[in-house]
Image (cartoon, rainbow, N blue to C red):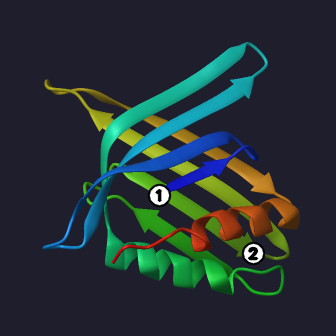
């Protein structure tokens, strides 16, 4: 299973492993954001998602349109990776937040936000809703 987006950012999630006891999946995330002075990149190979929470996210995505104020939110099991897609007042937005604690008492946060058009919203919804589920 893999999800790839090229707009609003170069974004992919690829399943690497699954767990059947608590239906969950480990994914590799690859995010690249071009900006005027270069490119910001985030890559992580150990992001776990609860499959039931993934289904809730898919149900929330189905409700998103230009007519209603809704939020579709997907958090990893650790809470360190989040995707939020929102519609409000006829505007859609896409947010991804990646937090990484280090082994000491520091860490970093990678956050991206962009208002998107409804063609981009339809594409994002399609990519997430058309995946082959194994659970």
Give the SS element for disc 2.
Answer: strand
Measured as percent of width and height from the top left, residue 127 is found at 65, 63
Relative to 57, is 59 above or below? below
Front in this rendered view, residue 80 or 131? 131
The residue beneath circle 1 is: 1
**Measuring 59% from the left and 66% from the top, which residue is drawn there?**
128
Instruction: Residue at 25% x, 54% y: name it.
Output: 78
Q: Is residue 87 left or right of residue 76?
A: right
Task: Decide which of 4, 115 is in the foreground and name it.
Answer: 4
**Between marks 1 and 2, how big is the CA–CA gap?**
30 Å
Compare marks 1 and 2 and give the one earlier in the sequence: 1
Q: Is residue 43 above or below residue 12?
A: above
Query: Tag 1, which secondary structure?
Result: loop
How many neighbours does mark 2 have within 10 angstroms: few (below 14), some (14-19), or many (20 or more)?
some
Q: Residue at x 18, y 71 (%)?
A: 20
Q: Which mark is residue 88?
A: 2
**Left or right: where does residue 99 sit relative to residue 46?**
right
Q: Residue at x 16, y 27 (%)?
A: 105
Q: How far across and how far down the image is residue 37, in percent?
A: 74, 13
């Amino acid at each position: 299973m893999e999800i790839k987006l090229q707009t609003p950012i170069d974004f992919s999630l690829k399943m690497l492993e699954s767990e059947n006891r608590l239906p969950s999946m480990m994914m590799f995330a690859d995010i690249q954001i071009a900006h005027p002075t270069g490119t910001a990149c985030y890559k992580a190979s150990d992001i776990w998602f609860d499959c039931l929470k993934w289904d809730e996210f898919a149900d929330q995505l189905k409700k998103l349109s230009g007519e209603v104020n809704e939020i579709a939110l997907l958090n990893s099991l650790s809470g360190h990776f989040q995707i939020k897609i929102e519609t409000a007042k006829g505007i859609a937005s896409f947010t991804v937040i990646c937090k990484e604690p280090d082994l000491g008492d520091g860490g970093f946060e990678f956050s991206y936000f962009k208002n998107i058009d409804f063609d981009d919203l339809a594409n994002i919804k399609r990519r997430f809703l058309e995946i082959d589920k194994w659970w």
